[in-house]
Amino acid sequence: MQIIGPRKAEIIEVEMPALKEGDVRVRIQKTCLCGSDIPYFAYDQQKLLDEGKPNAAGHIDYSQPKVYPLPVGLSLHECVGVVVESASSDFQEGDFVLALPFDQYGFFEYLTLPESRIFPLPEEPVSKQEILMAQPLGTLLFAWRMMPEIKGKTVAVLGQGPVGLMFNALLKLRGAGTVIGIDRLEERANVGREMGADEIIVPGDAGSLEQLSDLTNGEMADVVIEAAGHADLSFNDAVDLVRKEGTIFEFGVIDTDYVDNYPFGKVFYKNLTVRHSVGAKDKGDFLAAADLIAEGKVDMKPLLTHSFPFANAQTAYETFVDRKDGAIKVLIDFE
């Protein structure tokens, strides 16, 4: 797959890379779009370059005057499949694995990666679609190392998209006292209850600040997790929703190097702690996430709302980016 312009992707043919010592070639079976894939499809990258505001996450060569077409295979990185060739002693043909591309260059029928980017997965008792969620859930387990103590605490999760919903489940599993899911889309907030939220807030006539104050008797949240990112970046809201001396955990993807009107004064005078997490790639996190899913400790089925064949990837992108028909997790099925 190659993105050839804003909101336009097409299938092209490329040569298979050579297999080097230690490499593993995987035939992809199931994949899923992630929020961090959105900028490459939905944003006008040429306009961003011309305005001097290239996407902060990179992965695109902005040194040339023309950005499009984007590099082949960008952007997809939640991928599971079966090993078809191996130059690694750790993997053999037929193994079912999670394949983690470099820098989100994963939109290929076959991925050829070093063994360090391949992780074995259980084939039972859950579906391939469910175990695929070990990749995004693994990023939450990686993030958890930076998380403050949450046992018995009130935690608000801003954004009830895929990541926010997984945070709901993980927070309850690990002892949070009250989990409050917040989203402006009511259908997503309602799924938040299925995924572990004790309370949901849909800003309307009464904003999220007023509703959270009512739910917490004016004390606000001990921890606020910002799980929206992108154009919906809710950091400023998080600063208002967290109590004094509380913690904000910024997980949502930041699109630009600088955010206008960063509320430095509020952060300072509320004496807040701000933590971040990005770049999960540790084997242990993905394997632990797979175990949580396979053992039924985290139910991923409510997230899996849509699936399209590889040939309809354009429609899959549009459905995910535009949140059509209640879309949460949009799968692309290579089988």
Image (cartoon, grey):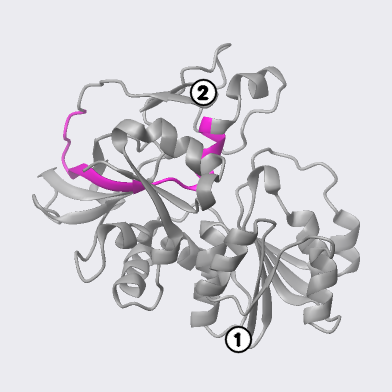
Give the total number of marks visible in the rendering.
2
Residue type, label 2: Asp
Q: Residue at x 62, y 58 (%)?
A: 227
Q: Which quarter of the rendering shows the N terminus?
A: top left
Q: Which mark is residue 142?
A: none
Residue 243 visible in the current orientation: no
Answer with left or right where residue 16 lies relative to residue 332: left
Which residue bears the numbered disc 2? 61
Q: Which residue in the rendered view is the most extreme toward the top?
A: 65
Q: Mark number for residue 151?
A: 1
Residue depicted at 79% across the width and 59% down the height: 237
Q: Position of residue 334 (x, y in %)?
A: 25, 41
Up/down of 93 relative to 5, above or below: below
Other-residue count near label 2 (Cα within 10 Å), few / some / many at <14 / 14–19 / ≥20: few
Helix, strand or loop under label 2: loop
**Sooner in the amino-acid sequence: mark 1 or mark 2:** 2
Q: Which residues are magenta?
A: 17-41
Q: Position of residue 26 (x, y in %)?
A: 20, 43
